[in-house]
C-alpha cells in the first residue's frame, strides 16, 4: 500500500515536466526508494522505536496481537484505498492515526498524549509549512540562474551552450528526484518495521528487507493514478523548478530521518509544489 501511494511522489516532477516517461520515472523512483529502505535499519533506529509504540502505550498493550494487527490493517487499508482513486495521502499520518486509535482502544487514558503531540504531531504539522517557506524564499534564485544559463525555457542571457546546460540540468533533475525517493525510503520503511517489531513478528534485518521489497512491488504494480495527480493536476513546472522542489523535499526528509522525526514525504513534497504555485501562479487550487 505504501509503494502504491508514495513511490511516484519523488519523481512526479520528472514526469510532469516531460523530463522522463512514466515508466522511466517509476523505475527510477522504485530503485532509489529500495536503496533508501534497505539502509533504513542503519540510519533510522529512532523511527523504528517510535513506531513500535514504546513510550506511547503501556507494555501490556504492546504485547496484545490485536493492537499491532489493528495498526497495520488500519493504515494499509486507508493508504491503498486512496491510491486506487489517485488521492495522495501520507502513510506516516495513516500510521499515526492507526497507532493513536489502537492505542486509545487498548489503553484509554494511559495513552501518552503529550508524547504523541510532541514527537509525532508537531513535526508532521510544521514540515510542509517549512517546505512552502523554503521554496518561496529560494524561487527567486532561479531568475539569477536564468541570467547565466539558458535552460528549460527559463528566459535569460546564456553564458553556457544551451545543449550543455540542458543536459546538466536533466542530470541534476534526475539526481534530485532520486534523492527524494531515497529519502522517502529511509523515513517510511522504519515506520512499518516498527509495527512489525511491536508484533514481535521478525527481526529488524529480515523485516526491513521484506518491507523494502513489498514497497517496491507496490510502486511497480499501482502508481499511475497517483502519478497523474502529482505530476499533472496540481501545477505545471519546468525542469529547473522541479529540481528546486525536489532538493528542498529531500533535504527536509533526510534531516528529519537523522533527527528521528516522523515527517510525511507526501506533505513535504506537496508543500514544495504549493510553494511553486505561490511563487509563479497557475495552480489548480481545488486539487
Image: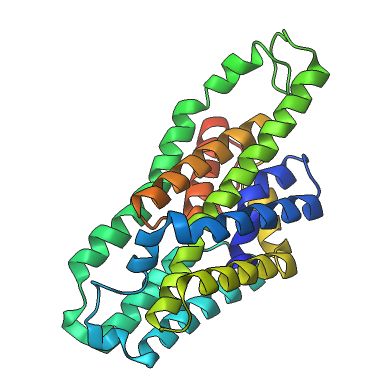
**Residue 120 sits above or below residue 74 on the image:** above
* x and y percentages locating residue 14 in the rendered image: 71, 43
Residue 90 visible (yes or no):
no
Q: Quadrant of the N terminus?
A: bottom right
Q: Quadrant of the C terminus?
A: bottom right
Q: In terms of depth relative to the viewer, which is nearer, 222 or 57?
A: 57
Q: In terms of depth relative to the viewer, which is nearer, 145 or 203?
A: 203
**Colouring rule applied to residues:** rainbow
Q: Quadrant of residue 178?
A: top right
* x and y percentages locating residue 259 in the rendered image: 34, 49
Judge left or right: residue 20 versus residue 198: right
| Residue at the spot 57% in from the left edge and 60% down from the top edge | 38
| Residue at the spot 52% in from the left edge and 22% down from the top edge | 140
Q: In terms of depth relative to the viewer, which is nearer, 36 or 230?
A: 36
**Residue 58 sits above or below residue 192 on the image:** below
Residue 110 visible (yes or no):
yes
| Residue at the spot 41% in from the left edge and 55% down from the top edge | 263
* x and y percentages locating residue 170 in the rendered image: 74, 32
* x and y percentages locating residue 286 in the rendered image: 56, 54
Q: Quadrant of residue 173?
A: top right
Judge left or right: residue 122 versus residue 95: left
Count of labels in the image = 0
| Residue at the spot 45% in from the left edge and 40% down from the top edge | 132
Judge left or right: residue 80 versus residue 67: right
Amino acid at each position: 500500500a505504501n509503494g502504491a501511494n508514495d513511490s511516484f511522489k519523488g519523481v512526479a516532477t520528472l514526469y510532469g515536466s516531460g523530463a522522463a516517461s512514466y515508466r522511466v520515472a517509476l523505475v527510477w523512483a522504485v530503485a532509489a526508494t529500495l536503496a533508501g529502505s534497505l539502509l533504513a535499519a542503519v540510519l533510522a533506529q529512532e523511527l523504528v522505536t517510535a513506531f513500535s509504540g514504546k513510550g506511547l502505550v503501556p507494555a501490556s498493550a504492546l504485547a496484545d496481537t490485536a493492537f499491532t494487527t489493528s495498526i497495520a490493517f488500519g493504515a494499509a487499508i486507508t493508504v491503498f484505498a486512496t491510491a486506487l482513486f489517485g488521492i495522495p495521502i501520507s502513510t506516516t499520518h495513516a500510521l499515526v492515526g492507526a497507532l493513536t486509535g489502537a492505542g486509545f482502544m487498548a489503553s484509554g487514558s494511559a495513552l501518552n498524549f503529550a508524547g504523541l503531540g510532541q514527537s509525532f504531531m508537531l513535526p508532521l504539522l510544521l514540515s510542509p509549512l517549512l517546505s512552502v517557506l523554503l521554496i518561496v524564499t529560494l524561487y527567486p534564485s532561479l531568475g539569477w540562474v536564468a541570467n547565466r544559463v539558458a535552460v528549460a525555457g527559463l528566459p535569460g542571457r546564456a553564458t553556457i551552450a544551451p545543449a550543455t546546460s540542458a543536459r546538466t540540468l536533466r542530470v541534476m533533475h534526475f539526481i534530485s528526484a532520486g534523492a527524494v525517493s531515497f529519502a522517502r525510503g529511509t523515513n517510511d520503511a522504519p515506520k512499518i518495521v516498527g509495527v512489525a517489531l511491536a508484533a514481535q513478528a521478525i527481526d529488524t534485518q529480515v523485516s526491513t528487507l521484506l518491507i523494502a521489497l513489498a514497497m517496491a512491488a507496490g510502486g511497480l504494480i499501482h502508481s499511475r493514478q497517483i502519478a497523474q495527480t502529482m505530476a499533472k493536476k496540481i501545477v505545471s513546472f519546468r525542469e529547473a523548478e522541479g529540481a528546486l522542489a525536489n532538493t528542498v523535499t529531500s533535504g527536509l526528509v533526510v534531516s528529519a530521518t537523522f533527527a528521528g522525526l516522523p515527517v510525511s514525504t507526501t506533505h513535504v513534497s506537496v508543500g514544495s509544489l504549493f510553494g511553486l504555485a505561490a511563487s509563479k501562479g497557475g495552480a489548480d487550487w481545488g486539487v
